[in-house]
Image (spheres, rainbow, N blue to C red):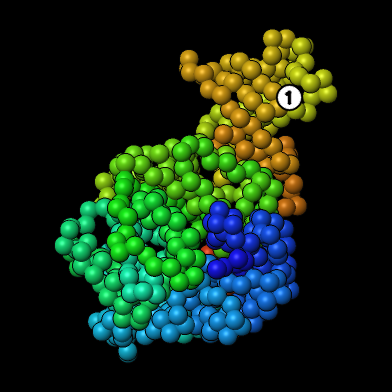
Amino acid sequence: MITSVLVANRGEIACRVFRTCRDLGVRTVAVYSDADANALHTREADTAVRLPGAAPSETYLDGALIVKAALASGADAVHPGYGFLSENAGFARAVLDAGLVWIGPPPEAIEAMASKTRAKELMGLAPLGEVTEADLPVLVKAAAGGGGRGMRIVRRLDELDAALASARAEAASAFGDGEVFVEPYVEDGRHVEVQILADTHGTVWSLGTRDCSLQRRHQKVIEESPAPGLSGALTAELHALAVRAARAVDYVGAGTVEFLVAGDTAHFLEMNTRLQVEHPVTEEVFGVDLVAEQLRIAEGHALDPEPPPARGHAVEARLYAEDPARDWAPQTGRLHRLAVPGAVRLDTGFTDGDDIGVHYDPMLAKVIAHAPTRAEAVRGLAAALERAVIHGPVTNRDLLVRSLRHEEFTRARMDTGFYDRHLAALTAPAPDPYAPLAAALADAHGRSRFGGFRNVPSQPQLKRYAVGDEEREVRYRHTRTGPEADGVRVLYADAHRVVLEADGVRRTFDVARYGDEVHVNGTRLTALPRFPDPTAQLAPGSLVAPMPGTVVRVADGLAEGSAVEAGQPLLWLEAMKMEHKIIAPGAGTLTALHAAAGQQVSVGALLAVVQPSG
């Protein structure tokens, strides 16, 4: 019987596994990098073991170090979570060789399926060899790992070599394996997958379908179960193929078989030999705890002959610290407050006051809604996200709400090209027009020595705020009866709550301020000085780091004095396990280059200057 589990992972998935372990009376052990010394998963475990360093390659990807931690802590089992070493057969063998229980599939099954190239061969498929114009578009894909890392779409043959190099570098950094392959890219298909669970007694459960079509950078954003709109015949085929894949490798434990569906045709993509990020939607629909089942299977228990029946519909949204309007740039900083109301499930690796760093994936939480029907689940999830209190860096919350309410999604007509078509509309600024006034009134009350507004007339007051890319000026006046603003009645105001009436409509605003960062209901503002600093201007053509990270490479031959073309990649930053291109804003001459490979840069750091032509 398992008595103590070390989770060879971090963040949300580690906290998720710990929750089930506590319910089962199993002791928990965390491992943590120096960057995660105060992370939630580190604090929640019964015991925690330090992995010296911050980079994944020297901490969470060091299997020998993790096995050593398990033995030192007295753990008798290891759960890999997802990502990092979860699909590494060598790590699984090292755990078993150390006399520990491996809560996952046999190493041989991982080897057969963890490499997407070998998995395709097992299913009678093969990746492309030499790519020609007739093969385009194609997808360059990492053979190991997942999460959209090491993947590039190629639509022009002359872009293939650069895509291969970029995908190899990203895959090697994320998974410790730079192998990539090329396969045909199916435009605008649906990403559908099947959850399987298998024991050591020959029983394989097929736990319904999931649709994961809404993706950015090939990484899933919104998932649901069951996948809507599939015919009975196609659903049966998907289940049969998933069970066939599991039996082909004598699979044990939880796994996922993924497909790209075009019309009524299913194209096998891969089998993930681990638990998936989106597993909660399956748990909600089938009423099972997949982590608990993983532990029971690892202890040798048999599954029931048939899985439990499905009930209702579940939808999950991944809440990220990122800015979708700026090429999904990850964001860092202090998460001051995170609270999601309503009858939803919240799986997270963060809590109030935690810092979001640069080393790992920027996912803050998963929010899951379950209801008798799809429409009710979608509506409930959108409402919960809209009312969520999220104080800290920019997030994708507004994008999630708009996506869930988009006609294509509500009518279940979405596909993997959803964000390619709709991103501009889904990220169009729509700040609350009264949020800056509410922020200014709350700030004035909070800063008053007398605890409120003065009871004598005063000159108009001016406040400036940045709301996204816009600057807003607010003017109001203190009077004997309270503050006044043109066209708006101020019914109440204190440092945290403001009530306004405009056009006969009364609205209440909750205000929270953290330095110059202000949150008014769902709007994030930055307080600006009344008079801008004239020394803060950058030269035209200046390129600054959109996020803190590491310069992983500079374009070959690039040097000061080089001529560049509009859109030409100049250098690449890696932040939160994703690679980001810095491109020339226009044709011109590179007059300054302040970046070098391996250099750590902070947000706003000057990387290069391109002097425009003419």
Name the kind of residue labelled 1 in the image. Answer: His
Q: Is residue 290 visible?
A: yes
**Secondary structure type for disc 1:** helix
Please report the residue visible at 53 percent of the width from the left and 22 percent of the height from the top: 507
Tell me if 3 is positioned left or right of 410 in this view.
Answer: right
Please report the residue visible at 69 percent of the width from the left and 48 percent of the height from the top: 353
Count all numbered tags in the image, as a single digit. 1
Q: Outermost residue, bottom direction? A: 130
Q: Is residue 133 visible?
A: no
Tell me if 613 is positioned left or right of 198 in this view.
Answer: right
Q: Outermost residue, left direction? A: 233
- Residue 85 sits in quarter: bottom right
Q: Residues within 10 Å of mark 1 (few under 14, many from 20)?
A: some
Of the 4 image quadrants, the one containing the N terminus is bottom right
Q: Which residue is mark 1?
A: 445
Q: Outermost residue, right direction? A: 449
Query: Looking at the picture, does residue 99 appear above or below residue 255?
Result: below
- Pick the front one: 235 or 229: 235
Query: Looking at the picture, does residue 51 appear above or below residue 391?
Result: below
Tell me if 223 is positioned left or right of 104 in this view.
Answer: left
Query: Looking at the picture, does residue 480 appear above or below residue 553?
Result: above
Residue 289's x, y, as percent? 45, 56
- Pick the front one: 88 or 442: 88
- Residue 521 sits in quarter: top right
Of the 4 image quadrants, the one containing the C terminus is bottom right
Please report the residue visible at 59 percent of the width from the left and 21 percent of the height from the top: 499
Residue 173's x, y, as percent? 57, 77
Residue 177's x, y, as percent? 52, 83
Residue 505's x, y, as percent? 48, 18
- Residue 111 sits in quarter: bottom left
Please report the residue visible at 68 percent of the width from the left and 72 percent of the height from the top: 74
